[in-house]
Amino acid sequence: MAAVLPTSFQSLESLSPEDKVLFNCYGRGETILPPFTRVHHALEAIASQYPKATAVRHFDGTTISYGELDRRANILANELRTRYGFKQRDRAVLVYSRSIEMVIFIFAVLKAGGQYVPQDGGIVPPETLSYVISDSAARVVLCLPKFQEKVRQSLKLGQDHNVSVVSIDTHSDLWASGNATSPAVNIQPYDGAYIIYTSGTTGRPKGVDVTHSNVTNTLLLEPAKLGITVGKNVAQQLNVAFDMCAWEILATIMNGGTLHPRGSGNELWAECLRRVDIVVSTPSVALKRFPNHEDFPNLKTIVVGGEPCPKPLADHWAPHASFINICGPTEITILNTAHLHKLGGPLTIGKPNPNTTVYVLDDDENPVKIGEPGVMWVGGAGVSRGYLNLPELTAARYKYDKFVKDGSMMFNTGDLGRWDSEGRLETLGRRDDQVKINGFRVELDGVSRAIESHPDIVKGCALKIDDSALWGFYAAPTAIDEEELRKTVAVSQPFYAIPKIWWYLGPTIPLTANGKIDKRALRDLAANADAGSVSSVPLTPEESDANTSGVSSSGSSSRSTDLEKAILQVTTIEIDELPPKNGVHGWRWLRHTGLSAYRKLFGVLFIANLVAFAVLVWQSRNANYELPLGNLATAVSANLLASVLLRQDYLVNLIFWLATRLPTSTPLSIRRHFARVYHYGGVHSGASVAASAWWIVFTISATARFAPASPSQPSERIAVLVLTYLILAFLVGILIMAYPSIRAKMHDQFEWTHRFAGWTVLALVWAHLVVVTAATSSSKALGPALAQTPTLYLLALTTLSIAAPWLRLRRVKVVAEPLSTHAVRLHFDFKTPRQCSSLGVRITDRPMVEWHAFAAIPEPDGKPGLSLLVSRAGDWTGKIIDNPPTTLWTRGEPASGVLAIAPLFRKVVLVATGSGIGPCLPVIMERKVPCRILWSTKNPLKTYGQGVIDEVKRCDDTAVIWDTDNMGRPDLVKLAWQLYNDSGAECVCIISNARTTKRVVYQLEARGIPAFGPIWDS
C-alpha cells in the first residue's frame, strides 16, 4: 500500500510563507492506492480475466498467452521450490537475452517468493557475473542454455559452491509435466521484487534493492502505466539488465499489454517498432531508431529518459504522439517525475508521480527558494530499500524524510534541478563527477582508478569531453598500446565506461596549486587537440548490443572523426614489424605455391596414371604396341569416377571428418598438414586431366584401328570414330574453360560448360561404350559383352554420383532479413547444421542455369534451421538483395568448407573481409574453438546489422572490426600477424576474395605461420 502523504510538509522554517505554499504544492504527487501490492498478482488477474490474450510476441513470430505465461511461471516456481530448495526471500540471478523465457523467469521467481537479479548473458563479463552472484547471495542462477557455460565459468571464479544452475528454454519437457498450481507463498508488499546492479564504475557494481510495493506503486498508476491495457503493444528494446527494461517488461505484463522483444539488426529492430503502440527509450536510441514520425506513424506513446532529451526530438514527436520526458534514478524505482511535452512549450521533467515527493535542497539538506537551483531529493512509495551490502553508502544517500516525519526515507539523486513557475522541474546536470555516457551512469573517479591499475601508469584521469566522449588521460614513462589500456580498464569497468580516446601526457600529469589533477588544463588540451597528441582510439567503431539495446551511441563529433583517421594511421605504424620471410625467394615460391598441397595431389594422381600407362605400354609390346581399347576405356572411366566422386557432398564431408579427427595434442607440424584437406580439389583436377589424357590415347588407338577402310561393320566403325572425336572435343572444351585464369574471367560460362558439357560427355560415353562393344565383340551378344566390361560399372557409379544431388532437388521456403542495400540474411528451415560444421549450401532460383554456394550459419539459441549471409557481388546476389525471394531451390547435401578444419587447433585467428564473416560465423557462434577475430568491411553496422556484430563480439570482445569507410584498407597481413603473435593462436584462417586470400596466406606461410584460406578450387 502506498504511503499516505501528509497534508503539509514540515521543517520549512528557512522558506518564506509564499515559498512554503509552493513547496507543498509543487513537491507532492497525488495520493492514489495501486490496485495490487504484489507484482505477480497483477499478472494473475490479467491471466484470469483474459487467458487467451497475447502476453509476449517474439520477433520470430512465437507468442505466449497470458494463461500460458501464468501456467509456466507457476510450473517453474514450483520446480525452483521443490527441486532446488528455493525459499521465500531467496534471490535468483537471471542470465538471459530478449525472449519469452525472460518473462517466464521473472514471474516464476516472484511467484516462488524470491527476488530476481537480471543480467544480460550476451555482454556481462564472467568476472562481473561472478561478483553479482556472490554479492546477491543468490541461491539459484536461472539461465538460457546458451549462457550455461558462461555461468559455470563465473561460478568457478568465486566461492559460490552451493548455487544451483537451472538451464531451461521453450522446448523443455518441464512445461508439459510440471505442477501448474500457484505456489502457496505469503509474499509481503515490502519483500524484494528485483535487484538492479548499476554501473559500478567505482570498482564494483552496486545492487539496488527494489520491493514489490515500489514496483506496483510506480507501474500500476499513471503516468508510468502509459495507458497500457489489453491489446496495447509495447516494445522491449532496451538492455535487459537496465532498470528501464524492467519498466518495459513489468508495466506491460502487469497491465495486460503485449510485449514485443526486438531482434538484433536494423531491420528487425525497425520491424519491432512498426508493430507497437508504446515505446520506452533513451533519447539517443530514439534519435537513432525512430527519429521521424513518417517512418513510424503507429507509435502513439513515446517515453524517453536516462539522459537529457534534445528539444527538437520532443518537438518533432509531440504533435503526433504522447511524448513523455521522465527523470528518475534506479534507486527510486525507474522514475519519479514525468512531463507530457507539448509543441512550443518548455521541455522539463515534469511533476512528481503519485505517492511521490520531490524536494530541491541545498548542501545542508534544507529547502532552497522556489526557482533556485539545488539537489533533487525524492521521497515516497518509490524509494527503494537501499544498496545491497553497502550500509555506509546507503546511509549517505538514503535518509529519513524529515519533511513528512513518518519513518519513510528520501533519496539524494545527485541531480541538480529547480522548479519553474508552473511547478515543473528543470534538470541542471549532475552535482558530482558521476556522468552519463550515452545514457549509462559512469563515475569518473572509478574509471580513473581503473586506468591507474596498469603497472606502468603513474597517474590517470577520465573526463567526459564534448558531452559525449569519454577520454582517458595518463602519465607514464612511455606510451602504452591502446589495446592494452582498454583491457586494463575492462577488468573492472563495463564496456561503456572504457575511454574512447586516449591521451599520453608524458611522465607527469598537470596539477593545480593544491596538488590535485588540473582537470581544466586537461580539458583545454582536449579542446586544442591535434591528431599527433593522442595515442590511439578503438579499432572497433561498431556499437555492441548492450550499447544499442540500452542506449545508442550518437557517434563522435567531426573533430573526433578526424582524430580517429589520423590516429589509426599511427596505430597501424606501431604494429609490431613482421618477422623476415624464411629462405630465399625461389625456394619460398616452390614450397608454398609451386608445390602446394593442391598441386601435390594433382601431381601424385597424374604420375600414378603415367605409371599405369607405362605398364599398359609394356604389356602390349608383344602385340606391336597396339593398346587394348578396353583397358584404355577402363582407365578413362576410373578417372572420371574419381573426378566426380571428389565433388560428391557425402564423400567430401567424410574426407573432412576423417582429416579433423586428430586430437589437438598431436604435434602442430602434423595437424597443419591435415588442415590442408580442403586442397582435395587437386584429386578432382588431376583425375579430370588424366581422364582427358587417357581419352586422347584412346582416340589415337581407335583411329588407328577403325579408320582404315574395311568392308565389315563400316557403320559401327564410323560411329565409333565420330563419338570418339566428339567426346574429345567436349573434354578439351571443358578443360579450357576450367583453366584458373579463364574460369575466373568467365565464371558463368564455366558453370554452364561444366554442367551441360559434362552431362553431354557422360551421355556420349554411354553411347560410345555400347557402339565400341558392339564393334569389337563379334563372337558375343551385346548384353553379355557389356556385362563383362568394367567400364559399364564405373560409368554406372559415375552416373549415380552425378544424379544423387539432383535427386534431392527441392524448393524450400526462405525468410529474408534485409540487412542493408548491400547484404541480406536468408533464413531456411530445411536443415539444421551442426555448430562449427562450416557447411556450404547451394541455392538458386534457376536450377538449370546457375547455382551459388554460401556458408550455412546455424540459427542462434539452438533453434532449428540455418541462415545464409548474402552480399552484393554480382547480378544474381544483387537481384536477391533488391527483391528478396520467398522460395529458392536447393539440392544435395551441404558440403564441408575450409573452416571445418578449425577443431584441429587449440586457438585460431579468423580474418574476414566483407561477407567473408558469414563462413566464420559457425565457428564463432559455437565458441568451442577460441578465436581472435579481424573483420575488415565497409560500414559493418549499417551493412550487416547489429546481430552479426553481436556474435563476433560475444566470441571475441576485443575483436578488431575495421570500418574501411572511415579507416581505409588495412594491412591484413600485419594485423593478422599481430593477433596471431599476441593471442598465442596456432594458425590463421582467412575468408576473403581469391587475390587477398592468396596474398595473406603466402605472406604468413613464408614466415612459418600456419595459414589457411579457400583456393580457387576448394
Image (tube, helix red, strand yellow):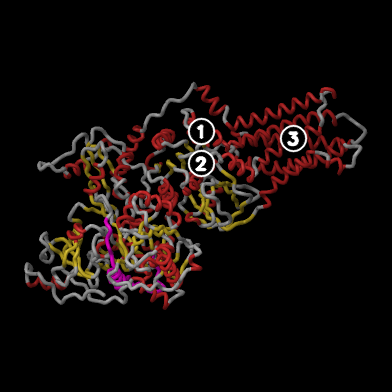
The answer to whether residue 514 shows anywhere in this view is yes
> Mark 2: which amino acid?
Ala
Cα separation, mark 1 vs mark 3, equals: 40 Å
Q: Residues within 10 Å of mark 2 (few under 14, many from 20)?
A: many
Label 3 near label 1: C-beta < 8 Å?
no
Q: Residues within 10 Å of mark 1 (few under 14, many from 20)?
A: few
Quarter of the view holding residue 706: top right
Cα separation, mark 1 vs mark 2, equals: 15 Å
For the point 25% across and 61% down, which residue is it? 329
Which element type, helix, strand or loop, lies under badge 1?
loop
Q: Which residues are magenta?
A: 206-235
Q: Residues within 10 Å of mark 3 (few under 14, many from 20)?
A: many
For the point 10% across and 41% down, which residue is it? 513
**Label 2 sits on residue:** 902
The image position of residue 504, as x and y in percent, is: 24, 37
**Label 3 sits on residue:** 636
Q: Is residue 140 magenta?
A: no
